[in-house]
Amino acid sequence: MTHWLIAPILIPLLGGILQVFMGYAPISLRRTLAIATTVLMLVSAVVLLALASDGSYRVYAFGNWQPPFGIVLVLDRLAALMLVLTAVLGLFCHIYASGGADEGNRQFHALFLFQLMGLNIAFLTGDLFNLFVAFEVLLIASYGLLMHGGGTSRTVPGLHYVVLNLAGSALFLISVGMIYSVTGTLNMADLAVKIPQVTGSNLNLVKAGGMMLLVVFGLKAAILPLCFWLPKAYARATAPVAALFAVMTKVGVYAIVRIYPLIFGENAGELANLGMDWLFPLALVTLSMGVIGALGADNLKTLVAWQVIISVGTLLAPISLGSEDGLSAALFYLVSTTWTVAALFLVAELVASQRGTAADKIVTAPKMRHRTFLSVLFLIGAVAASGLPPLSGFFGKLLILKSVEPGVEMAWLWSVLLVGGFLTLIAYSRAGSIVFWWNVDGHLETPEPINNRVAVSTGILTCLTMLIVVLAGPLSDFTRATAEQLHDNQGYINILQTPMHTPQNPLVGEIN
Amino acid sequence: MELLFAIAIGALTTSGVYLLLRARTFPVVMGLTLLSYGVNLFLFASGRLATGQQPVIGTTASYSDPLPQALVLTAIVIGFAMTAFLVVLSLRNLADNENDHVDGRREATTPPSKIEQEVSSK
């Protein structure tokens, strides 16, 4: 049993606790320590990625309880991929935040680190109830972060966000209770064994539980009937927070990918592919709704917030079809879209800081400073997000289009995705040409200066899309292997047989 | 006992959902609290209702399941924290918008009196 598995949880936890007690320390010291914590977390995530790429499952059992008793952390390719994705995103958002956005609240860094910890627990846990706890940890940190920076405009969207998520938590608990009352276990591997054996009247109970769980994950992922809280909340959050939240909807997607192929997969008997026939049309409608929202957006941040919803629809459509290729393509697109959307949030904030009162509204305004730098970053982000070659969004969408087998689903997915991509392109070109090209005479008197940290972190995060293109081969090999691993749930079930190390008579050993 | 328990959960959940859909933050907070009570009782019942049983396997023929009780305890703690946060947020909303509508909508202040209406019509 390797102890590395606990590192991505312990590092931000300890770093965050340190920040809590350092509220009155000089801000430069707090920034240095906080960013050092995030860097350490990235290192541990990369180590775990290296560990996981041999394709085996690694288990960390708290208190050495043999699974399914006790809580386990499970590391596989999917968990490692999500950890690295989040750690990279977290690092650049954190560097951006240390350029000035973290002022005004002493606990910003603590909240930021606890948010990362919650995300890491969610990705590593192998227990349904522990997943609930992880959701709550990341949510309560996100409530604080969403309110960060003050301003009355954030109160109402924040209130909606909190109330909706509390109602979501209640639903989560009800579905956990339903599933537990029938199966008597909440360990995911054990559930994958027990659920195919459920028969008779209990079947409906588990089915209801599973469907309600899908509603909860749908709320987190912002699928259509549950997505209207997102644009307002994200568009009004501080830029690094909004950028970090780009990964929050992906937690919902992750939970669907983790739980449904494993527990309600091909082998689940009567409950096989539960809910997936609902998910496919909903994903396409979500995608269309996101495009409509993007076309109607009146400022850059709202435009990017709707892009979050577009990417959720694009991700869930191939996932719900259940093919291995689709899953692999979706994971590839997930990496690309998360970083791109986050980068666009940061670029939108920088643009807003250079335009005075016009901020990030899509209106004509005096010429901004640093126009070349910002417009190039926006161009790269927009090309990657709308899925034009040669950037990574194009490859992601191409893989998704290729993964569908000919049939009705193919016709729907191809038409919605392609038309949607075209309309997104129009939305970005409209926004870009008005913001960057249509200027009224004169210069803004006092634009806020752009400091190095902000510029460098935004630049690098934007250019990660090019890195994905360069490393497209290894990355798609990795996502294909991940999809294979997820598809064959026998491997995950085998963690129940992991031998636990039990010391012989430990008390005696200590005395000697 | 099962019937009574089920009715209690049902009543709590119904009133919770009803209050949750109101337009003021105070009923919404109350609604979420009631909903979480209902949910906690439901979670408690998922280990089956039993009285006077030991929570240890092997000591007697029947036992009461200790796990749901642990889950409920966790859920209660989390629920408390979240409710506290929500109350503070609602107060902030009240202060920012000068009323506690959930959408921050300002009410049309007292309808214009007759004299004002006459003045405006002239």
Image: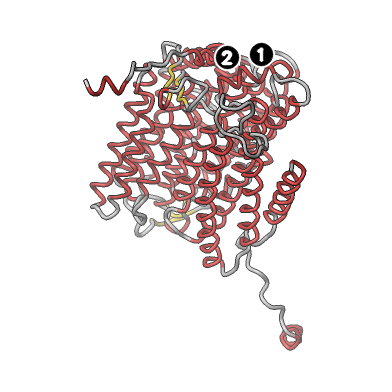
Question: Which residue is identified by label 2?
Answer: A489
Q: Position of residue A158 (x, y in %)?
A: 54, 53
Q: Amino acid at mark 2?
A: Asn
Residue drawn at x 69%, y 78% is B110
| Name of the residue lying farthest toward the front | B60
Which of the 4 image quadrants contains residue A398?
Answer: top right
Question: What colouring does the structure picture have?
Answer: secondary structure
- Residue A375 in the figure: left or right of residue B112: left
Residue drawn at x 61%, y 17% is A193
For the residues beneath circles 1 and 2, the answer to whether they share a chain is yes
Whether label 1 touches label 2, CB < 8 Å: yes
- Residue A503 in the figure: left or right of residue A160: left
Which of the 4 image quadrants contains residue A410?
Answer: top right
The chain containing the residue under callout 2 comes to: A
Q: Amino acid at mark 1?
A: Asn
The quadrant the N terminus of chain A occupies is top left
The chain containing the residue under callout 1 comes to: A
